[in-house]
Image (cartoon, grey):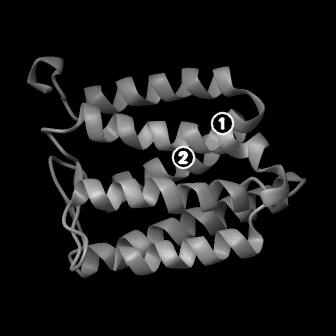
Amino acid sequence: MYILINIFYMIAGFKWGDWRNWKGYYPTILFFIIGDFLYNFLLYKPSMWLFHDLILPNHTTITILAMVVSYSATVLIYLGRFPKGWKKRSLWFLLWVGIYLCAEYFNSKFGFITYHNGWNMWWSALLTGIIFFILPIHHKRPLLAWLLSIIIIVSLLSIFDVKISEMK
């Protein structure tokens, strides 16, 4: 399943991504990837969600594939075609949040993602919204995006009662 999703993102990225300006988006692609690495590192033991697949062997493999392919394509398309005007930006934001949430919903229904330790689809919706809100901020004002991200990470660790002493 995840191979197909990433093939879709790869095709979409090549077709609609702003490859001419990829160097300008590269820091935000890395920011997106680092966020996922932090999740997988900080929440190694008390995972909030885990990916499963029929072909790919484990969560780590699926996540690395998503980081390299899906996140790169997402940033190149999302920021590369980021519209002007708040109305168009809001619709673009909702479209992308919807794409990610639809994919997650179907993956959860077919057992390709499982939720743990109090996480659920509603938390995913909130986090997805935060991600698509913060990507353009990072593109224009990276330090502000990092500050917001640290606040969000600390808040989520607190909400889900993740203890530093229980981390690996």
Can you say whether 88 is above or below 111 in the image? above
Q: Between 17 and 138, which is closer to the camera in this rendering?
A: 17
Q: Quadrant of residue 135?
A: top right
Q: Give the left or right position of residue 154, taking residue 111 as reference.
A: right
Tell me which residue sits at (15%, 23%) in the image. 163
Dot 1 amino acid type: Pro
Q: Quadrant of residue 153?
A: top left
Can you say whether 114 is above or below 134 in the image? below
Tell me which residue sits at (89%, 53%) in the image. 85
| Whole-percent x, y for residue 39 in the image | 33, 39
Quarter containing the N terminus = bottom left
Can you say whether 59 is above or below 143 in the image? below
Residue depth check, mark 1 versus mark 2: number of the one nearer the observer: 1
Q: Give the left or right position of residue 92, taking residue 59 as reference.
A: right
Tell me which residue sits at (53%, 44%) in the image. 130
Secondary structure of the residue carrying tag 2 is: helix
For label 1, the residue is 27
| Whole-percent x, y for residue 26 in the image | 67, 42
Dot 2 amino acid type: Ile
For label 2, the residue is 131
Q: Which mark is residue 124?
A: none
Q: Residue furthest left?
A: 166
Q: Give the left or right position of residue 65, taking residue 41 as reference.
A: right
Q: Is residue 120 visible?
A: no
| Whole-percent x, y for residue 20 in the image | 85, 56
Quarter containing the C terminus = top left
Dot 2, crowdedness within 10 Å: few (<14), some or many (≥20)?
some
Q: Earlier in the sequence, mark 1 or mark 2?
A: 1
Q: Quadrant of residue 110?
A: bottom left
Q: How far separated are the C-alphas under marks 1 and 2?
A: 15 Å
Tell me which residue sits at (29%, 58%) in the image. 61
Secondary structure of the residue carrying tag 1 is: helix
